[in-house]
Protein backbone atom coordinates (compact mmCIF):
# COMPACT_ATOMS: atom_id res chain seq x y z
CA UNK A 1 0.00 0.00 0.00
CA UNK A 2 1.38 3.39 -0.97
CA UNK A 3 2.17 5.87 1.85
CA UNK A 4 3.12 9.55 1.94
CA UNK A 5 6.18 9.01 4.11
CA UNK A 6 9.70 9.58 2.81
CA UNK A 7 10.40 5.87 3.02
CA UNK A 8 7.24 5.04 1.10
CA UNK A 9 8.07 7.50 -1.69
CA UNK A 10 11.62 6.18 -1.93
CA UNK A 11 10.27 2.65 -2.12
CA UNK A 12 7.97 3.64 -5.00
CA UNK A 13 10.79 5.40 -6.86
CA UNK A 14 13.13 2.43 -6.52
CA UNK A 15 10.37 0.09 -7.68
CA UNK A 16 9.65 2.24 -10.74
CA UNK A 17 13.34 2.38 -11.65
CA UNK A 18 13.92 -1.35 -11.24
CA UNK A 19 10.76 -2.30 -13.15
CA UNK A 20 11.61 0.16 -15.94
CA UNK A 21 15.11 -1.28 -16.29
CA UNK A 22 13.71 -4.81 -16.28
CA UNK A 23 11.16 -3.87 -18.97
CA UNK A 24 13.84 -2.30 -21.16
CA UNK A 25 16.15 -5.30 -20.80
CA UNK A 26 13.25 -7.58 -21.75
CA UNK A 27 12.12 -5.59 -24.79
CA UNK A 28 15.51 -4.76 -26.32
CA UNK A 29 16.24 -8.32 -27.61
CA UNK A 30 12.89 -8.37 -29.44
CA UNK A 31 13.61 -5.01 -31.04
CA UNK A 32 17.05 -6.24 -32.10
CA UNK A 33 15.58 -9.37 -33.70
CA UNK A 34 13.01 -7.31 -35.62
CA UNK A 35 15.67 -4.81 -36.74
CA UNK A 36 18.01 -7.63 -37.79
CA UNK A 37 15.33 -9.25 -39.91
CA UNK A 38 15.14 -6.04 -41.99
CA UNK A 39 18.91 -5.49 -42.15
CA UNK A 40 21.28 -6.14 -45.02
CA UNK A 41 24.12 -8.65 -45.05
CA UNK A 42 26.75 -5.92 -44.84
CA UNK A 43 25.17 -4.30 -41.83
CA UNK A 44 24.76 -7.56 -39.95
CA UNK A 45 28.41 -8.36 -40.56
CA UNK A 46 29.71 -4.92 -39.58
CA UNK A 47 27.49 -4.06 -36.61
CA UNK A 48 27.38 -6.35 -33.59
CA UNK A 49 24.27 -4.73 -32.16
CA UNK A 50 21.72 -2.20 -33.41
CA UNK A 51 18.07 -1.33 -32.85
CA UNK A 52 17.43 0.50 -36.15
CA UNK A 53 18.98 -0.76 -39.40
CA UNK A 54 20.68 1.84 -41.59
CA UNK A 55 19.27 0.24 -44.74
CA UNK A 56 15.93 -1.53 -44.69
CA UNK A 57 15.69 -4.74 -46.72
CA UNK A 58 12.79 -7.13 -47.23
CA UNK A 59 14.97 -9.86 -48.73
CA UNK A 60 14.65 -12.18 -45.73
CA UNK A 61 10.85 -12.02 -45.79
CA UNK A 62 10.73 -12.38 -49.58
CA UNK A 63 12.97 -15.39 -49.14
CA UNK A 64 10.77 -17.25 -46.64
CA UNK A 65 7.50 -16.26 -48.36
CA UNK A 66 8.71 -17.33 -51.81
CA UNK A 67 6.26 -20.27 -51.84
CA UNK A 68 2.84 -20.99 -50.36
CA UNK A 69 4.34 -23.63 -48.05
CA UNK A 70 4.56 -21.17 -45.18
CA UNK A 71 0.92 -20.14 -45.63
CA UNK A 72 -0.32 -23.75 -45.70
CA UNK A 73 1.71 -24.70 -42.64
CA UNK A 74 0.34 -21.60 -40.91
CA UNK A 75 -3.19 -22.85 -41.53
CA UNK A 76 -2.22 -26.22 -40.04
CA UNK A 77 -0.84 -24.46 -36.95
CA UNK A 78 -3.99 -22.36 -36.59
CA UNK A 79 -6.16 -25.47 -36.87
CA UNK A 80 -4.12 -27.43 -34.33
CA UNK A 81 -4.00 -24.46 -31.96
CA UNK A 82 -7.71 -23.66 -32.09
CA UNK A 83 -9.03 -27.24 -32.07
CA UNK A 84 -6.38 -28.37 -29.60
CA UNK A 85 -7.18 -25.56 -27.17
CA UNK A 86 -10.91 -26.32 -27.35
CA UNK A 87 -10.22 -30.02 -26.71
CA UNK A 88 -7.87 -29.15 -23.85
CA UNK A 89 -10.41 -26.92 -22.14
CA UNK A 90 -13.26 -29.36 -22.73
CA UNK A 91 -11.47 -32.33 -21.17
CA UNK A 92 -9.71 -30.36 -18.45
CA UNK A 93 -12.76 -28.44 -17.20
CA UNK A 94 -15.13 -31.41 -17.25
CA UNK A 95 -12.70 -33.59 -15.33
CA UNK A 96 -11.82 -30.74 -12.96
CA UNK A 97 -15.49 -30.11 -12.23
CA UNK A 98 -16.12 -33.77 -11.49
CA UNK A 99 -13.11 -33.92 -9.15
CA UNK A 100 -14.21 -30.72 -7.41
CA UNK A 101 -17.37 -32.48 -6.20
CA UNK A 102 -16.44 -33.87 -2.80
CA UNK A 103 -19.16 -36.53 -2.88
CA UNK A 104 -17.70 -38.17 -6.02
CA UNK A 105 -16.95 -41.85 -5.37
CA UNK A 106 -13.27 -42.65 -5.93
CA UNK A 107 -12.33 -38.97 -6.07
CA UNK A 108 -9.18 -39.29 -3.96
CA UNK A 109 -7.95 -42.26 -5.97
CA UNK A 110 -8.31 -40.38 -9.24
CA UNK A 111 -6.59 -37.32 -7.75
CA UNK A 112 -3.69 -39.49 -6.61
CA UNK A 113 -3.36 -40.90 -10.12
CA UNK A 114 -3.35 -37.39 -11.56
CA UNK A 115 -0.57 -36.33 -9.16
CA UNK A 116 1.32 -39.53 -9.96
CA UNK A 117 1.25 -38.65 -13.68
CA UNK A 118 2.93 -35.33 -12.86
CA UNK A 119 5.92 -37.14 -11.38
CA UNK A 120 6.18 -40.22 -13.59
CA UNK A 121 5.54 -40.34 -17.34
CA UNK A 122 5.55 -43.17 -19.82
CA UNK A 123 8.23 -41.59 -21.97
CA UNK A 124 8.58 -40.93 -25.67
CA UNK A 125 8.63 -44.51 -26.98
CA UNK A 126 5.57 -45.77 -25.04
CA UNK A 127 3.68 -42.65 -26.06
CA UNK A 128 4.63 -43.23 -29.70
CA UNK A 129 3.41 -46.83 -29.47
CA UNK A 130 0.11 -45.67 -27.99
CA UNK A 131 -0.37 -43.10 -30.76
CA UNK A 132 0.50 -45.72 -33.36
CA UNK A 133 -1.82 -48.27 -31.76
CA UNK A 134 -4.69 -45.76 -31.89
CA UNK A 135 -4.05 -45.23 -35.60
CA UNK A 136 -3.25 -41.54 -35.26
CA UNK A 137 0.09 -41.54 -37.09
CA UNK A 138 0.11 -38.95 -39.88
CA UNK A 139 -3.00 -37.41 -38.35
CA UNK A 140 -3.28 -33.93 -36.86
CA UNK A 141 -5.03 -35.52 -33.89
CA UNK A 142 -1.67 -36.98 -32.89
CA UNK A 143 -0.63 -33.44 -31.94
CA UNK A 144 -3.83 -32.86 -29.93
CA UNK A 145 -5.08 -35.99 -28.15
CA UNK A 146 -1.91 -37.14 -26.28
CA UNK A 147 -1.76 -33.83 -24.41
CA UNK A 148 -5.49 -33.29 -24.02
CA UNK A 149 -5.20 -32.81 -20.24
CA UNK A 150 -2.34 -31.15 -18.38
CA UNK A 151 -2.29 -32.48 -14.81
CA UNK A 152 -1.06 -29.23 -13.27
CA UNK A 153 -3.70 -27.15 -15.06
CA UNK A 154 -6.33 -29.67 -14.05
CA UNK A 155 -5.50 -29.32 -10.35
CA UNK A 156 -5.50 -25.51 -10.47
CA UNK A 157 -8.89 -25.40 -12.22
CA UNK A 158 -10.25 -28.03 -9.82
CA UNK A 159 -9.21 -25.89 -6.86
CA UNK A 160 -10.91 -22.87 -8.41
CA UNK A 161 -14.15 -24.80 -8.92
CA UNK A 162 -14.05 -25.89 -5.26
CA UNK A 163 -13.95 -22.24 -4.16
CA UNK A 164 -17.23 -21.38 -5.89
CA UNK A 165 -20.05 -20.78 -3.35
CA UNK A 166 -21.62 -24.17 -2.56
CA UNK A 167 -24.93 -22.46 -1.81
CA UNK A 168 -25.11 -21.23 -5.40
CA UNK A 169 -24.67 -24.72 -6.80
CA UNK A 170 -27.08 -26.20 -4.26
CA UNK A 171 -29.74 -23.62 -5.15
CA UNK A 172 -29.47 -24.55 -8.81
CA UNK A 173 -29.73 -28.23 -7.93
CA UNK A 174 -32.86 -27.61 -5.84
CA UNK A 175 -34.39 -25.74 -8.77
CA UNK A 176 -34.00 -28.92 -10.84
CA UNK A 177 -30.78 -28.16 -12.68
CA UNK A 178 -28.70 -31.22 -13.52
CA UNK A 179 -24.95 -31.46 -12.90
CA UNK A 180 -24.34 -30.77 -16.58
CA UNK A 181 -26.64 -27.76 -16.44
CA UNK A 182 -24.90 -26.42 -13.34
CA UNK A 183 -21.54 -26.85 -15.04
CA UNK A 184 -22.61 -25.16 -18.28
CA UNK A 185 -24.88 -22.38 -16.97
CA UNK A 186 -23.23 -21.46 -13.66
CA UNK A 187 -19.70 -22.81 -13.25
CA UNK A 188 -18.28 -21.90 -16.67
CA UNK A 189 -19.67 -18.32 -16.78
CA UNK A 190 -18.13 -17.70 -13.34
CA UNK A 191 -14.78 -19.13 -14.47
CA UNK A 192 -13.95 -16.82 -17.38
CA UNK A 193 -10.65 -15.53 -15.89
CA UNK A 194 -9.33 -19.04 -15.25
CA UNK A 195 -10.56 -20.36 -18.59
CA UNK A 196 -8.96 -17.46 -20.48
CA UNK A 197 -5.68 -17.93 -18.63
CA UNK A 198 -5.36 -21.61 -19.32
CA UNK A 199 -6.67 -21.21 -22.86
CA UNK A 200 -3.68 -18.94 -23.45
CA UNK A 201 -1.31 -21.47 -21.86
CA UNK A 202 -2.67 -24.30 -23.99
CA UNK A 203 -2.71 -22.19 -27.17
CA UNK A 204 0.92 -21.11 -26.74
CA UNK A 205 1.89 -24.73 -26.14
CA UNK A 206 0.20 -25.91 -29.32
CA UNK A 207 1.54 -23.02 -31.38
CA UNK A 208 5.15 -23.61 -30.32
CA UNK A 209 5.03 -27.40 -30.51
CA UNK A 210 7.05 -28.94 -33.31
CA UNK A 211 8.42 -32.09 -31.67
CA UNK A 212 5.07 -33.89 -31.82
CA UNK A 213 4.88 -33.26 -35.56
CA UNK A 214 8.42 -34.57 -36.04
CA UNK A 215 7.48 -37.76 -34.18
CA UNK A 216 4.03 -38.49 -35.57
CA UNK A 217 3.66 -36.68 -38.91
CA UNK A 218 5.46 -38.02 -41.99
CA UNK A 219 3.42 -36.10 -44.57
CA UNK A 220 5.13 -32.72 -45.02
CA UNK A 221 1.82 -31.21 -46.14
CA UNK A 222 0.57 -31.66 -42.55
CA UNK A 223 3.58 -30.09 -40.87
CA UNK A 224 2.75 -27.08 -38.67
CA UNK A 225 4.43 -23.72 -39.02
CA UNK A 226 7.10 -24.40 -36.40
CA UNK A 227 8.43 -27.43 -38.28
CA UNK A 228 8.57 -25.52 -41.56
CA UNK A 229 10.35 -22.62 -39.90
CA UNK A 230 12.82 -25.05 -38.36
CA UNK A 231 13.51 -26.39 -41.84
CA UNK A 232 14.06 -22.85 -43.07
CA UNK A 233 16.63 -22.22 -40.36
CA UNK A 234 18.41 -25.54 -40.91
CA UNK A 235 18.47 -25.09 -44.69
CA UNK A 236 19.17 -21.36 -44.78
CA UNK A 237 22.58 -22.05 -46.27
CA UNK A 238 21.00 -23.84 -49.22
CA UNK A 239 18.20 -23.05 -51.63
CA UNK A 240 14.85 -22.44 -50.03
CA UNK A 241 11.61 -21.79 -51.73
CA UNK A 242 10.77 -21.46 -55.38
CA UNK A 243 13.63 -19.65 -57.11
CA UNK A 244 11.54 -19.07 -60.25
CA UNK A 245 9.10 -16.92 -58.26
CA UNK A 246 11.86 -14.57 -57.14
CA UNK A 247 13.25 -11.52 -58.86
CA UNK A 248 16.31 -12.49 -60.96
CA UNK A 249 18.25 -9.75 -59.19
CA UNK A 250 17.21 -11.08 -55.78
CA UNK A 251 20.15 -11.56 -53.45
CA UNK A 252 19.99 -14.38 -50.94
CA UNK A 253 19.78 -12.80 -47.48
CA UNK A 254 22.34 -13.68 -44.81
CA UNK A 255 21.59 -16.69 -42.64
CA UNK A 256 21.27 -14.54 -39.52
CA UNK A 257 18.67 -12.33 -41.17
CA UNK A 258 16.62 -15.37 -42.22
CA UNK A 259 16.68 -16.74 -38.68
CA UNK A 260 15.50 -13.43 -37.25
CA UNK A 261 12.72 -13.17 -39.83
CA UNK A 262 11.64 -16.70 -38.91
CA UNK A 263 11.45 -15.72 -35.23
CA UNK A 264 9.32 -12.68 -36.07
CA UNK A 265 6.94 -14.65 -38.31
CA UNK A 266 6.43 -17.39 -35.74
CA UNK A 267 5.99 -15.03 -32.78
CA UNK A 268 3.62 -12.35 -34.07
CA UNK A 269 0.42 -14.47 -34.51
CA UNK A 270 0.35 -15.83 -30.97
CA UNK A 271 1.33 -12.42 -29.56
CA UNK A 272 -1.75 -10.93 -31.19
CA UNK A 273 -3.96 -13.24 -29.11
CA UNK A 274 -2.72 -11.94 -25.76
CA UNK A 275 -4.41 -8.48 -25.82
CA UNK A 276 -7.81 -10.18 -26.15
CA UNK A 277 -7.18 -12.24 -22.99
CA UNK A 278 -5.15 -9.72 -21.00
CA UNK A 279 -8.04 -8.46 -18.86
CA UNK A 280 -8.64 -12.01 -17.61
CA UNK A 281 -5.03 -13.18 -17.48
CA UNK A 282 -3.75 -11.55 -14.27
CA UNK A 283 -6.93 -12.28 -12.35
CA UNK A 284 -6.97 -15.90 -13.48
CA UNK A 285 -3.35 -16.50 -12.50
CA UNK A 286 -3.79 -14.93 -9.06
CA UNK A 287 -7.00 -16.79 -8.28
CA UNK A 288 -5.46 -20.11 -9.23
CA UNK A 289 -2.36 -19.34 -7.19
CA UNK A 290 -3.87 -18.23 -3.88
CA UNK A 291 -6.91 -20.45 -3.59
CA UNK A 292 -6.76 -24.14 -2.94
Image: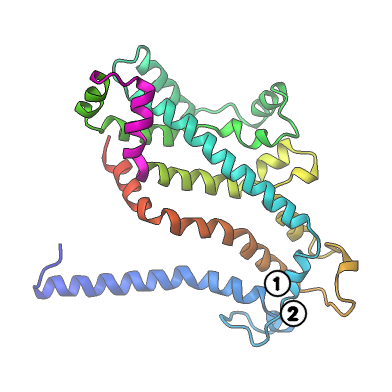
Looking at the rendering, which quadrant does residue 24 occupy? bottom left
Q: Is residue 269 above or below residue 110?
A: below
Q: Nearer the viewer, residue 118 or 167?
A: 167
Instruction: Please name whichever residue, 161 or 263, is drawn nearer the observer in this view of the structure.
Output: 161
Residue at position x 9%, y 73% in the image: 4
Give the magenta-colored segment's residue range.
174-193
* Secondary structure character of the magenta stretch overall: helix
Q: Tell me: 179 left or right of 65.
A: left
Tag shown at residue 88: none
Give the position of the C terminus as an image quadrant. Answer: top left
> Is residue 267 in the magenta section?
no
Q: Residue furthest top?
A: 105
Return the mark for residue 41. 2
- SS at mark 2 in the image: helix
| Label 1: which secondary element | helix
Circle 1 is placed at which residue position? 257
Q: Residue at x 30, y 47 (%)?
A: 286
Amino acid sequence: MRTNTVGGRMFDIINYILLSVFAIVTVIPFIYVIAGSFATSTELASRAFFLIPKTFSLNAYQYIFSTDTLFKSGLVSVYVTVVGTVVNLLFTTTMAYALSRRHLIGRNTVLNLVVFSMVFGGGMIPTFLVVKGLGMLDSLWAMIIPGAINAFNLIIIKNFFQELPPSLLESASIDGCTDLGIFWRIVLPLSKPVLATFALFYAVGHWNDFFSALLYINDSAKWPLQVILQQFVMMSQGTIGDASSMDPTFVKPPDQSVKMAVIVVSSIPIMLVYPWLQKYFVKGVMVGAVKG
